[in-house]
Image (tube, grey):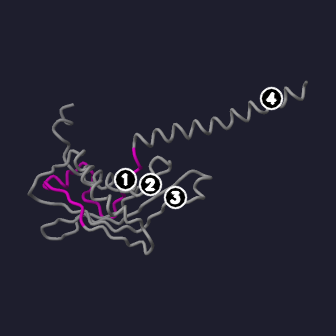
Amino acid sequence: MRATKVLVMIGVMTTAMFSQGCMERLVGEGVEAAMGPKAAYFEEKPLAEKKDHQALAAYKRFELGEVKNMTGKFMPPAFLTHLPAQFKEQLGKSDLPKEASGKTLVFQVSIIHYEAASTMDSAFGPFEEVVARVELVNKADGRVIGQGVAVTRSEKSVNLGPEKKAQGMAKALIKWASDYYPEAEAVKKK
């Protein structure tokens, strides 16, 4: 009888331990589904001394230039197909101007690392990452006004795949421009 109680107790404790991991994964997947893939940029040649400098205030258009695969290995062609569409979508959601003409800033993107999730990732949780060298170029004269690295990564299965990586890369690029652009009037009034 005592052995049965011990076995039941061990079974309950084991179930509780494993269900905690499942709940953490469930919550993590939900949060990342809502927020999308992680995106960041790191400047090597900053646009200005401080981000509140408004260095891009004169620009009225923002474009994605040529995207190059510099990884030296296979990269899903779908990523290169999705990136322009995701850039346009993220730009549309932003407070950046979208005028038909005017001073234009072009993002020149060179993908230097593309890591897709592998079967080994199933044991430890999925991980995908894209790293790109980016130049911010004044379209009129071809002058590079800023450069750095943009990174996007997914650590949950809900954000795996080339389309989500393209979404994250576009988010990083638009965030970069937004950090140096004057706040929208509506935001200032709040």
Residue at position x 57%, y 56% in the image: 121
Q: Establish if 64 lies above or below 178.
A: below
3 lies above or below 73 = above
Residue named by callout 1: 168
**Amino acid at circle 4:** Val
For the residues bearing labels 1 and 4, Cβ distance under 8 angstroms:
no
Give the CA separation, mark 2 to mark 3.
Answer: 11 Å
Contact, CB < 8 Å: mark 2 with mark 1?
yes
Alpha carbons under labels 1 and 4: distance apart: 47 Å
Q: Quadrant of residue 153?
A: bottom left
169 vs 56, left or right, is right
Quickly name the residue at label 2: 153
Q: Give the residues in magenta.
A: 36-65
Disc 4 versus disc 3: distance between alpha carbons?
38 Å
Q: Which residue is mark 3?
A: 117
**What mark, if any, has residue 8 been given in the picture?**
4
Q: Earlier in the sequence, mark 1 or mark 3?
A: 3
Q: Up-down: is 140 above or below 83? A: below
Which of pointers 1 and 4 lies earlier in the amino acid sequence?
A: 4
**Marks 2 and 1, Cα distance to the nearest angstrom?**
7 Å
Please tell me how crowded label 2 is: few (under 14), some (14-19), or many (20+) other residues with Cα within 10 Å. many
